[in-house]
Image (spheres, grey):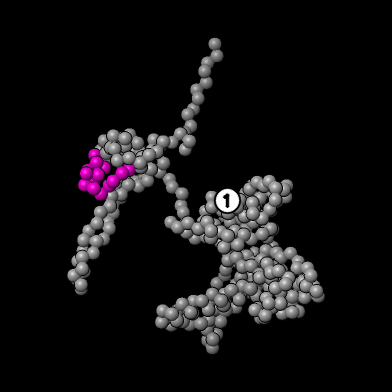
Amino acid sequence: MAKKKNVVKVETRKDEVRYVTSDIKKMLGKFLVKSLKRTWSEAFADEGTGEVVNIDRYEIIFDAGTYLGQEEISKINFYMQEGSIQEVEVSNQRRMAFEMTTDNFIPYMAQVLCDMKKKKFLLKAQSIDQAREIVKDFTELNFKGSFRITQIKEFDYCIILVDKLSTTPLDELGKLVMENSELYSDEEIKKICGEDKADIPESKFYNIDARIIFTTEGKDEDKEETNRQFVVQTYTAERAIMLINRYLNDEQDKLEEECKEKNRGFDRKIIHASIEQSTIIPISQYIPKEFSLAYATEE
């Protein structure tokens, strides 16, 4: 007679039972889903005005994943009677790790198999799960047929810049030249698009390690130097560094304006960026940050 094989029980979230309760009997023998804190208010009198102000206070009682035995239950019951704890979320599984979150948008690279062709997207998101949502939404809106997201990974931190010319309709090129005369001349437009401006070539994504020097006017010895990483969607590396210099000076303008509004002094710098290293990366499209912002979440 064949022996029965021992089946190893593997627990996953599919086996988890979690709930929120104020019944201490239902807490016994369970684990805390998240750190348990008690909260209360304290009244303080303003010495200047005499006004009484309530300030919220809190204290962590137990960390996430704590097993709730008799001793822990007694302590929770005391604070529930006191009123500084209302209810508790518990689980039949001990989960002590938690995923870090951020409200910053960081670069991601995604690969999508669309109509049997690989497409790589560059985008910004607050998490890998959010990045997947953004890529799925963008692909559904801009492509046809079936697709499959085959890869999403965090990209090296960088500042992403997009050349306006790479996203501008032909009938707006004249206006573009007028608005950005220091960046776009008629000669440059003709060189890129041809004499009749009929065909705008496909832009590339340049991954640029830029050396940036900040100096004070009239004080050449007062010099600061740093390196920053940029990804620029444009046509040549020369145009990319031009856009980087434009971006850095625009950021300085904003900072100067903020200081003026707050009546703070501002030492304006002469900024010069040059290319330390430049490579072309195989990106099909950049998903605009405005698209990603629709998915923004706050911590």
Question: Image quadrant of residue 239?
Answer: bottom right
Quarter the N terminus occupies: top right
Q: Which residue lies most toward the top here?
A: 1
Res 156 visible? no
For the point 45% across and 58% down, the residue is 298
Image-based side of 147 in relation to 14, left or right: right
Q: Which residue lies most toward the right here?
A: 195
The region drawn magenta spans 74-88
Closer to us: 177 or 217: 177
Q: Which residue is label 1 attached to?
A: 132
Examine the structure image and report whether residue 76 is included in the region drawn in magenta: yes
Quarter the C terminus occupies: bottom left
Crowdedness near tag 1: few (<14), some (14–19) or many (≥20) residues, C-alpha within 10 Å: some
x and y percentages locating residue 241 in the rendered image: 65, 73
For the point 70% across and 47% down, the residue is 145
Q: Is residue 259 above or below residue 44?
A: below
Question: Image quadrant of residue 226?
Answer: bottom right
Task: State the SS at label 1.
Answer: helix
